Amino acid sequence: MIDNKKPEKLQVPEIPYPVHGGDPRAMAEASGIDPDKLIDFSASINPISPPGCVSQLLLETPRLLREYPDPHCTVITKNISAATGIPENWIRVTNGSTEMIYLLPHLLRERQEVAILDPCFSEYEKAFTAFGVQAHSIPLNSDTGFQADPTLLFAQLDSIQQLGAIVLGNPASPTGKLYGDFLPHLQEYCEERATILIIDEAFIDFSSPDNSAWNLLKRNSNLILIRSLTKFYSLPGLRIGYGVLHPEKNSVIAPHQYPWSVNALAQAIGADVILDRAFQEKTRNWTLEERSFMFQALNSVREIEVFASDANFLLFRVRDGSESTGRSLYQHLLLQSLLIRNCGNFNGLDESFFRISMRERGDNLKLADSISEHFSSSKQAYKK
């Protein structure tokens, strides 16, 4: 007898969304998917291979492992200064930008509070609350493209009596929004209230260096920039970043940084890649091209709204705002071995928002086609 029954469709078990992007192996294991076939769009890491100098430096790993790392990060600090024009005594090299974030609370006085312009990298709130600092979320509205209206925003900030610091991303994560025109107004507000302004520029290298807030530092010693080398240079496993802050503030946090927190290999590689201008230009040109391609491809899908970005990722939301619609899309993509980042755990967003990083054209095309296919098949199923 011939069995005419159709084979059952493979189902991915419903699992909680990850807290952060960039854990594809754990997601594959939880979903029952081959980890070697999973394409990770959840972590915003440059897919271009690291600069050529990295391969050569890796050959020196045995020697570097036998030596204590330079506790002062002398060479990499010097090279960051040479590459950016930032004086050496304004630079603090850290174990990824995250270590710098967890040093920031030491700059606040007792009972001072912090305002975070959301959505923003979640570790800021965690870092300040871990030190007993009250964190206030100031959500920027997606309906206005996450614009910052000074009149409305400053009124909200005025209500925080013990305001010690304000945090903002530039470009912000996960929106990719730049705030160049707004930053001078925010800085002036901070000057008037003697408040620290913390600007996260972990993704600034994917944009033009001219978009950095570094020039504002010359006017206000209360401004702090947070930078990362791991995302742009495709080195997330090494953990290397730095902060840019006034020498007086730099000396305040110095005693709180763990000795030898930045390993020797990270220092050696970071010191070389920061000087590779050819790689920087190649990555910026590639990012602009792929981001434009993906924006147009996704913007043609009526069921989602895509937000303009100046980083190496795009944020989009499911237009009907339904958690079930978003979950259905996420599950559909997992079945295609495509992993994206749900943004429901960002303050100011919900589970209808997703972030995708840029990958090589073939991968990007596969993702765009799979998203379009999902909504097309959903409409057909609804008609039936």
Image (cartoon, rainbow, N blue to C red):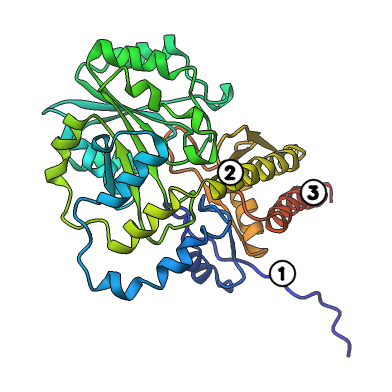
Position in image of residue 259 (x %, y %): 16, 55
Q: Which of marks 1 and 3 is in front?
A: 3
Query: Which residue lies at the image location 48% right of the left edge and 24% below the top edge?
Result: 179
Residue 57 visible in image: yes
Task: Give the secondary structure at mark 1.
Answer: loop
Nearer to us in this view, 253 or 306: 253
- Circle 1 crowding by C-alpha within 10 Å: few under 14, some 14–19, many from 20: few
Mark carried by residue 376: 3
Question: What's the CA distance linking mark 1 and mark 2?
Answer: 45 Å
Q: Decide which of tag 2 and tag 3 comes sooner along the chain.
A: 2
Residue type, label 2: Glu
Q: Decide which of tag 1 and tag 2 comes sooner along the chain.
A: 1
Nearer to us in this view, 344 or 337: 337
Residue type, label 3: Ser
Q: Decide which of tag 1 and tag 3 comes sooner along the chain.
A: 1
Position in image of residue 284 (x %, y %): 59, 42
Quarter that holds the N terminus: bottom right
What residue sits right under mark 1 in the picture?
9
Position in image of residue 71 (x %, y %): 19, 55
Q: In this view, does 320 lie to the left or right of 147?
A: right
Mark carried by residue 281: 2
Query: Which residue lies at the image location 35% right of the left edge and 17% below the top edge?
Result: 187
Residue type, label 1: Lys
Question: What's the CA distance linking mark 1 and mark 3?
Answer: 18 Å
Quarter of image, res 270: bottom left
- Circle 2 crowding by C-alpha within 10 Å: few under 14, some 14–19, many from 20: some
Q: Which of marks 1 and 2 is in front?
A: 2
Query: Which residue lies at the image location 63% right of the left edge and 52% below the top edge?
Result: 328
Position in image of residue 160 (x %, y %): 25, 18
Q: Answer above or below: position of 239 versus 125.
A: below
Residue at the right extreme? 2
